[in-house]
Image (tube, rainbow, N blue to C red):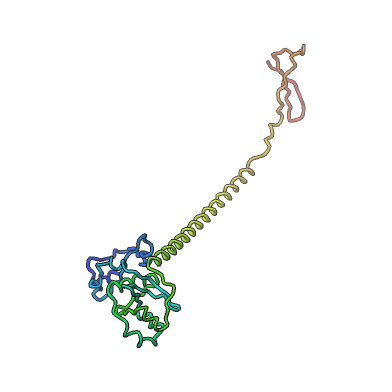
Amino acid sequence: MNRMIRECKINNEEIVENAPLINVYHVLVGTKNLVYVKILPKDNPTSKINRQYKTVLALRGGSLYITYRTVPFVCSGNHSYIPLNDILSMYPYLQTQLKPLARVPRTHELDFLQLVQLYHDEKELPSDTLLIDMDDLNQTQIIPSKNMTLIEHHAREKIKLEQQIALLNNSLTNKRKSQESHENKQVQQKSKSSSNLSTQSTPSVIRPPTGYFPPQQPSSSSPYTPQYQQNHWLSSNYGQRGRTRWQ
């Protein structure tokens, strides 16, 4: 890019290393208001800079359909003009009839047509472009249809760009949700596995020690056993029982 800038002899312009670039189309339709874009030629580009860009944006025009092609047009006075080359590419047999009627475009007219052209493709109009009045096309039975202004182009392309951005955002959101769901499933599976291992290692019933019997309190109404004495029955491993007293 810097080499191309140097070849065009444009001073004080340089692109830094690893600079991000964006398509002119996105600049054109990604802003709230219309912007003026002009592609400068390699030969003496500074002489082609149009300082009167407000004159360009003040023009009326847009694009129209002729048979299967989209053709830019610009309004000047009470007439509408289109590039002669676009007509001749579709109807080459009209060259001898239409070329004498064509005229050289003014600088701001050509710049306007270039601006409309950017909505359709990245091809720029040649510097030797000639314009033909659409009234002259009526004599050849060529009737343009479905004309669209530059403002309408801007609005339509802006909506298309916003839809593309929305689809991209939805795709990223769905992808993130899918990753989160997958991670949650993995965490649940790990938690379930840990719970099963804990259940297997813990006994469900705790048995008391062999030979232990809870103490039995003697009845307070017994005439033979004092209230301060307690009896304990002990069981040996051989099933024999003896009686022991302590106080």
Query: Residue 183: horizontal and vertical position, in percent?
Result: 53, 52
Query: Residue 222: horizontal and vertical position, in percent?
Result: 77, 13
Question: Going by the picture, which residue comes out furthest to the top?
Answer: 223
Task: Examine the rendered structure and indicate whether residue 198 appears above or below residue 34.
Answer: above
Q: In which quadrant is the N terminus drawn?
A: bottom left
Image point (36%, 81%), residue name: 136
Question: Going by the picture, which residue comes out furthest to the front?
Answer: 78
Task: Examine the rendered structure and indicate whether residue 119 appears above or below residue 88.
Answer: above
Task: Compare residues 239 and 36 and report the one nearer the observer.
Answer: 36
Image point (52%, 53%), residue name: 180
Q: In which quadrant is the C terminus drawn?
A: top right
Task: Compare residues 108 and 212 and report the one nearer the observer.
Answer: 108
Task: Examine the rendered structure and indicate whether residue 235 appears above or below residue 129.
Answer: above
Quadrant housing residue 67: bottom left
- Count every numbered label the image shows and give the total: 0
Task: Compare residues 68 and 123 and report the one nearer the observer.
Answer: 68
Quadrant housing residue 125: bottom left
Image point (77%, 29%), residue name: 239
Quadrant housing residue 118: bottom left
Query: Residue 17: horizontal and vertical position, in percent?
Result: 30, 64
Task: Compare residues 162 and 244 and report the one nearer the observer.
Answer: 162
Query: Residue 43: horizontal and vertical position, in percent?
Result: 25, 76
Image point (38%, 81%), residue name: 137
Task: Examine the rendered structure and indicate whether residue 52 appears above or below residue 195.
Answer: below
Residue 24 placement, left or right of 218: left
